[in-house]
Image: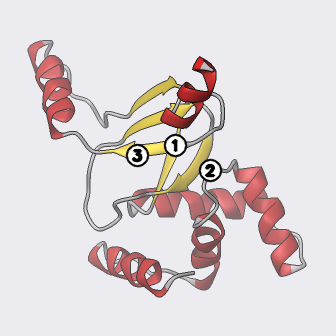
Amino acid sequence: MAAKWRKLAEGRCAEKGERLTPARLAVYAEMLGRGRPLSAYELIALLEQRQGRKIAPLTVYRHLDFLMRTGLVHRLQSAQTYFPCDHPDHAHESQFLLCSSCGRVDEVESSGLEALLAQIADERGFRPDNAVVEVKGLCGVCAVGAQD
């Protein structure tokens, strides 16, 4: 794991009064650099292979919950997968572009979209807990390939 990401993770946890244990760090490290979201069971298989022992699914789910609470990891609701946050240095609402061909996920930040969603909710007297936006389609590479 790159020292930069480890320092960011430790800092984020310290801000929230949480501890980044070796087991939590192992889950986070396994996700970094994969280039695609992973399901909890894919993570379990990768961790078991790396550590040479069985790992209980509940343990990994608890670590994933912790990593999401601290803002280090996101969960894609539509695919029930997880991946590391591209912007773990600050809190933000999640907006994702999901390629239905290659599986690429781009995390984007749009204060305009956040403001629009907040305005729509406010106009209806709705109080959202969070506002996750997942847009499915083709990434730039796959879209060009589809035109050929």
Question: In this rendering, is residue 14 above or below 30?
Answer: below
Q: Residue 105 — which label?
A: 1
Secondary element at image label 3: strand
* Label 2, label 3: how far apart the Cα atoms are: 12 Å
Q: Quadrant of the N terminus?
A: bottom right
Q: Amino acid at mark 3?
A: Glu
Question: In this rendering, is residue 134 above or below 55?
Answer: above
Is residue 126 at all visible to an observer of this figure?
yes
* Label 3, label 1: how far apart the Cα atoms are: 6 Å
Residue at 83% x, 61% y is 45
Q: Which residue is mark 3?
A: 107
Secondary element at image label 2: loop
Q: Are marks 3 and 1 in contact (CB under 8 Å)?
A: yes
Mark 2 or mark 3, which has the lower sequence index? Answer: 2
* Label 2, label 1: how far apart the Cα atoms are: 7 Å
Q: Amino acid at mark 2?
A: Arg
Residue at 62% x, 28% y is 145
Percent across and percent down for residue 55 are: 81, 68
Percent across and percent down for residue 25 are: 57, 77
Image quadrant assignment for residue 62: bottom right
Residue at 62% x, 21% y is 146
Q: Residue 36 — which label?
A: 2
Q: Nearer the viewer, residue 136 or 144?
A: 144
Q: Quadrant of the C terminus?
A: top right
Secondary element at image label 1: strand
Residue 2 appears left or right of 87 = right
Q: Residues within 10 Å of mark 3 (few under 14, many from 20)?
A: some
Q: Residue furthest top?
A: 124
Q: Amino acid at mark 1?
A: Val
Q: Are marks 2 and 1 in contact (CB under 8 Å)?
A: yes
Percent across and percent down for residue 80 are: 62, 38
Residue at 67% x, 50% y is 38
